[in-house]
Image: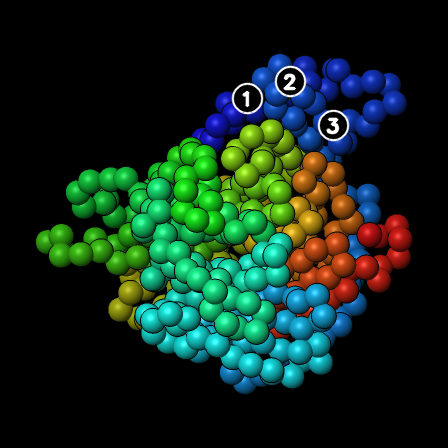
Amino acid sequence: MRMPGSALLFVSWAGLLSGCGAGESASAVAVRDSAGIRIVEHAEDSDSKPVRPTLLLRIEDEALFRVTGAVRLPEGGVVVANGGSSEVRLYDASGALRSTSGGAGEGPGEFRSLNVLRRLEDGTLAVYDSRLRRVQRFDPDGALLGSLTVGETDAPGNVRGIFVDGSLVVRGVTGGGGMPQQGVRRFLAPYSHVSAEGKALAALGSVEGSETLLQVFEGGQGIGLWTPPLPHVVELLPGRQRLFWFDSHQNEFRVTGPDGEDPTWVRRRIPLRDKSDPAWTAAVAEYLSRQAPEQRDFLERELNAWQEGPLPAYSAAHVGNDDVAWLREPDPAVEGQALWSRFDGQGTRLPPMLLPSGFRPLESDATYLVGVSTDDLGTESVEIFALDRLPPEDR
């Protein structure tokens, strides 16, 4: 993926490290070069022992299905974006349902495809509907306050994230022309920072997107879209005041200001595996076992031909309201626990966390982590973990 400033990564690391003082460790080096790019490099292994946060609350509600967002309110309640019912559901601090709002539809306060939920710094809630391309704002009790149709802004597209001030990270329309070629493809698209009122604040540049497997039907009568196993995923995730640029197949990520300014590159010295690794063979076999029989021949043929590129450096990413990045390591879970590495907005490594393997973070800050947990039967529950009850050395 080529982004502004990325060419500077091809400088000699030996030259950069030669500038370290005698008291500095080569396992974590911060350098600002003449172009103003700050680079932080970390050793392969963390010195810290992984810690398990304390479970505060589990919300078990049979209505929870396709949960796409969850945020914690100051008094301890939780607001959940429940895609299965196209609702925003409010639970109190004990986990009891207090109210619901929304429902399937296209009218005010209704949803077609809940995608992003964010609690803003003024206490209101911003909810993005990817099918209607509309951001709606609600008070904590679910009353509609206003809406913005992204297609009518200065930078129309699809919202990929929302800052706490209500401004948006928008992925524009993918360029192209004619029928795309069959196979695994990535498409270039422009990204923009857009105000809560729909005014363009900054062009963030064009970025190659995530991998998609395209099936072109005979005679050019349309295409089928598939998500391949262990796909190359690209995300721009906003924190509180920083924007995090992730590429799942690179052992580095970028942190900038909301407009792409003041960049820091964070690099990890971990060798990437390629598709000769048994993990790739196992992932393909598991993927094919879940597909309809009539599709397996096509998918197997395309995946066997798709041998270029490494395996993912991490399997999921999350950014908290405290500008801390969480990266789920690609290794299989051990005893039902998955390892998450963490870095703050300056690239400093924080103690890693062990979380249930079925857990997906949705919101966090320095004191808590809230997300959705899915069991082996596909049942979803919302869980809150305390991060401020760790031993001081683990915070």
Where is residue 220? Give x, y as percent. Answer: 13, 52
Q: Residue at 37%, 76% (x, y): give it.
A: 104
**Residue behind mark 2:** 33
Numbered tag placed on residue 29 in the rendering: 3
Contact, CB < 8 Å: mark 2 with mark 1? yes
Q: Nearer the viewer, residue 47 or 346?
A: 346
**Residue behind mark 1:** 8
Q: Which of marks 2 and 3 is in front?
A: 2
| Relative height, residue 185 to residue 331 (above, below) | above
Q: Residue at 84%, 52% (x, y): give it.
A: 394
Label 1 element class: helix
Query: Which amino acid is tagged 1?
Result: Leu
Q: How far apart are marks 2 and 1 (CA)?
A: 9 Å
Numbered tag placed on residue 133 in the rendering: none
Count of numbered labels shown in the rendering? 3
Q: Residues within 10 Å of mark 1 (few under 14, many from 20)?
A: few
Label 2 element class: loop
Query: What colour-coding does the image apply?
Result: rainbow
**For residue 205, which quarter of the picture?**
top left
Query: Which amino acid is tagged 3?
Result: Val
Q: How far apart are marks 1 and 3 (CA)?
A: 16 Å
Query: Which amino acid is tagged 2?
Result: Asp
